[in-house]
Amino acid sequence: MPKEVGRKVIASNRKARHDYAIVDTYEAGVVLVGTEVKSLRLGRASLVDAFATVDDGEVWLRNLHIPEYFQGTWTNHTPRRNRKLLLNRREIERLIGKLKESGLSLVPLSMYFNDGKVKIELALARGKKAYDKRHDLAKRDAQREVAKVAGRIRKGKW
C-alpha cells in the first residue's frame, strides 16, 4: 500500500471559532487503537462536545466521538473514551502555565491525517461573550457587502 502524503481533514469544529476567541494553536498526535483508525479512515468522527484537559502533566482529549468500526468484532473500541494527546514537554508546560490564567480552555479545532498519521489541532481559547459574537457577525456581513460592491464595480455593472 502506498504511503499517504499531504493533509486530509477528517472532522472540523466550526462552532469553536464562533464560540471562542483563539489565542494560540498547537498540533498534537493522538494515541488510538486499530479500530479507531479504521473508523477515522472512513471519515467518521465528531468534535462537537470535545475538549482537552491537562492531568498529571499529560494532555487528554475528552468527549471525542469516534463511532465503532462496523466490521469490528469484540476488539472494537468505546466511542467516547478519553484519548491521550502527544505533545512536547515544553509545549505541555507552556499550556499548564497559560491554563492557570482565568477563562482559558483547550478546544479541538480539527482532526486530520498528516502523512498518514492522525493529528489534532488544539486551540488555547477564551470564551466569547454574546456581544462579541454579534460584533463578529456584523463585521463578516460588512465585509461580504464590500466584496459584493467591489465585484460589481470590477464587472462594470455599478
Image (tube, rainbow, N blue to C red):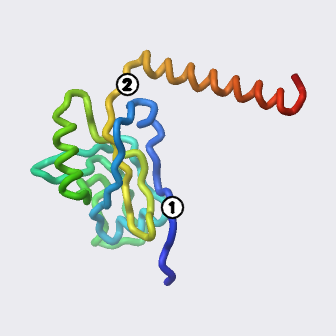
Left or right: residue 42 versus residue 19 is right
**Which residue in the protein does label 2 denote?**
128
Between disc 2 and disc 1, whose residue precedes? 1
Q: Residue at x 43, y 70 (%)?
A: 116
The one nearer the camera, 74 or 63, is 63
The one nearer the camera, 38 or 18, is 18
- Mark 1 Cα-neighbour bin, 10 Å: few <14, some 14–19, many ≥20: some
Above or below, 1 against 22 in this view is: below
Q: CA distance from mark 2 to mark 1?
A: 29 Å
Q: Position of residue 91 (x, y in %)?
A: 23, 51
Q: Residue at x 29, y 47 (%)?
A: 63
Left or right: residue 146 versus residue 81 is right
Residue 87: assigned label: none
Q: Position of residue 86 (x, y in %)?
A: 25, 60
Q: Position of residue 94 (x, y in %)?
A: 20, 45
- Mark 2 Cα-neighbour bin, 10 Å: few <14, some 14–19, many ≥20: some
Give the image quarter of residue 16: top left
Q: Residue furthest left?
A: 56
Give the image quarter of residue 124: top left
